[in-house]
Image: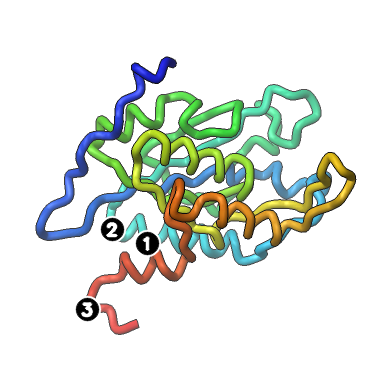
Amino acid sequence: MSSEEIQPAAATNATPEGPTRSALVVVDVQEGFNDPSWGQRNNPACEANIAALLAAWRRTGEPIVFVRHDSQSAGSPLLTGQPGNDLQPLLTGDPDLLVTKSVNSAFHGSPDLHAWLVAQGLSRIVVCGITTNHCCETTARVGGNLGLDVTFVIDATYTFDRTGPDGVTIDADTLSRVTATNLHDEFADVVSTDDVLDRARPASDPR
């Protein structure tokens, strides 16, 4: 797709009675990421935080997008048609849209996520899922470049230790902090799950 074919998202359908609508984009929360071959991960609270975000979106009726990585690589824990390709049970209920992809960005999958957002009158997305510095970060970067208002929920993502080309292993927590630094105030607003839930909580809720 050429740059001429990509248009900024349409204006939101916010009303005086309520906040601007946001689509929750849940990236690659799949069984294959439980495979021990990935190595040491961080953020054991990730799954609970994703579940809390999903529950909040279900309560308000806001749109939810699930993204699934359909790997075409033999031996991949996310290989299409294998159990690891399945979404994890914590992703309850049906999404408003299921995007499948074989690359990092959820905006380069099927159906076209950006076109769907435009059709829904949505220009705000909230990104969570797996992994922080690959498909989640890439989705946030592309969303920001498309002119969307992107919120990146850093503690509703996780990643794994990675060894660089110099042979030095960088731990998952450091990689997550680097992603937060790369994205914040450039491609996205990087926040915590509590930040998002506080914004979504009705004023009458005493919590």
**Residue at figure coordinates x 74%, y 52% from the top left:** 160
* Apparent side of residue 125 relative to residue 69 in the rendered image (left or right): left
The residue lying toward the viewer, choosing from 96 and 168, is 168
Residue at the bottom extreme, as displayed: 206
The kind of residue tagged 1 is: Ala
Cα separation between marks 2 and 3 = 15 Å
* Apparent side of residue 73 relative to residue 190 in the rendered image (left or right): right
| Contact between labelled residues 3 and 2, with CB atoms less than 8 Å apart | no
The crowd level at tag 2 (other Cα within 10 Å; few <14, some 14-19, many 20+) is few
16 vs 27: above or below = below
The kind of residue tagged 2 is: Thr
Q: To which residue does mark 3 refer?
A: 204
**Residue at figure coordinates x 38%, y 67% from the top left:** 197
**Residue at figure coordinates x 44%, y 16% from the top left:** 1
Residue 127: x, y in percent?
Answer: 47, 49
Q: To which residue does mark 2 refer?
A: 60
